């Protein structure tokens, strides 16, 4: 895996997330925070977890190990969450674009939120972030579909087929 592969995965990641956020823009504030049978208890909880995980792992990849995740209460509205996500996407894209291929294969050292040290290959961590997002976009998609606002097909192949380069 090289930098070009990582950049393509992140194009997909942000395309899929944008579809979820667009669909979420169609629901009511009550639906955004309503209790639901998903891992993080609501659509808001699910989306905050997705954003918080991307934020946390980006910082870890940059040598900073946060001790806490983002709190759901920091985002009383979808608008605030979407704005923060735009900022995070810009920060991640800037980080990814400055990477060299050799760095993708190199180690990243970090601490968990409990203070346990770990080391992984940077490229593996970057793929993990996208894979993690896929899981929780799926949970968000279930809720949005139940609310009558499906984000549509979020498959990687659908994204690739829509690309002008014909991947």
Image: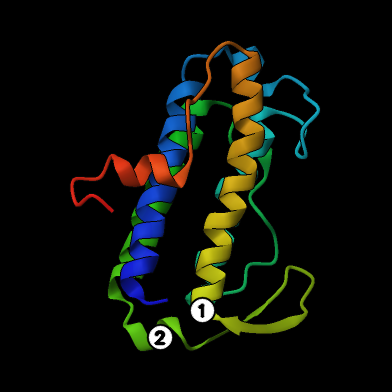
| x and y percentages locating residue 41 in the rendered image | 77, 32
Provide the residue designation for mark 1: 122
Judge left or right: residue 96 versus residue 42.
Answer: left
The foreground one among 153 and 101 is 153
Judge from the rendering whether residue 116 lies leftward or rightward of residue 69; answer left or right: right
Please name the residue shown 53% across and 15% down the image: 149
- In space, the residues marked 1 and 2 are separated at their CA atoms by 7 Å
The mark nearer the N terminus, 1 or 2, is: 2
SS state under label 1: helix
Q: Relative to the observer, which residue lies in front, 103 or 142?
A: 142
State the image coordinates of residue 98 (x, y, percent, origin top left): 29, 75
Quadrant in which residue 47 is drawn: top right
Q: In the rendered view, would you say 118 is above or below 135?
A: below
Residue 54 appears in view: no
Disc 2 secondary structure class: helix
Q: Residue at x 37, y 77 (%)?
A: 2
Q: Which mark is residue 103?
A: 2
Compared with residue 113, is residue 48 higher up or lower down, i.e. above or below?
above
**Are the residues flagged by discs 1 and 2 in contact, CB closer than 8 Å?**
yes
Question: Which quadrant of the figure contains the C terminus?
Answer: bottom left
């Amino acid at each position: 895996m090289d930098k070009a592969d990582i950049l393509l995965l992140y194009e997909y990641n942000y395309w899929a997330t944008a579809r979820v956020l667009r669909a979420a823009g169609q629901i009511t504030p009550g639906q955004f925070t309503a209790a639901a049978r998903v891992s993080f208890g609501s659509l808001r909880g699910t989306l905050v977890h997705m954003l918080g995980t991307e934020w946390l792992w980006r910082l870890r990849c940059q040598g900073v190990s946060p001790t806490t995740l983002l709190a759901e209460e920091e985002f009383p509205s979808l608008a605030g969450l979407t704005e923060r996500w735009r900022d995070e996407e810009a920060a991640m894209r800037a980080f990814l674009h400055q990477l060299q291929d050799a760095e993708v294969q190199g180690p990243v050292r970090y601490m968990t939120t409990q203070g346990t040290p770990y080391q992984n290959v940077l490229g593996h961590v970057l793929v993990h972030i996208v894979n993690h997002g896929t899981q929780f976009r799926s949970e968000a998609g279930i809720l949005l579909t139940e609310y009558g606002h499906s984000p549509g097909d979020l498959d990687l192949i659908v994204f690739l087929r829509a690309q002008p380069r014909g991947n």
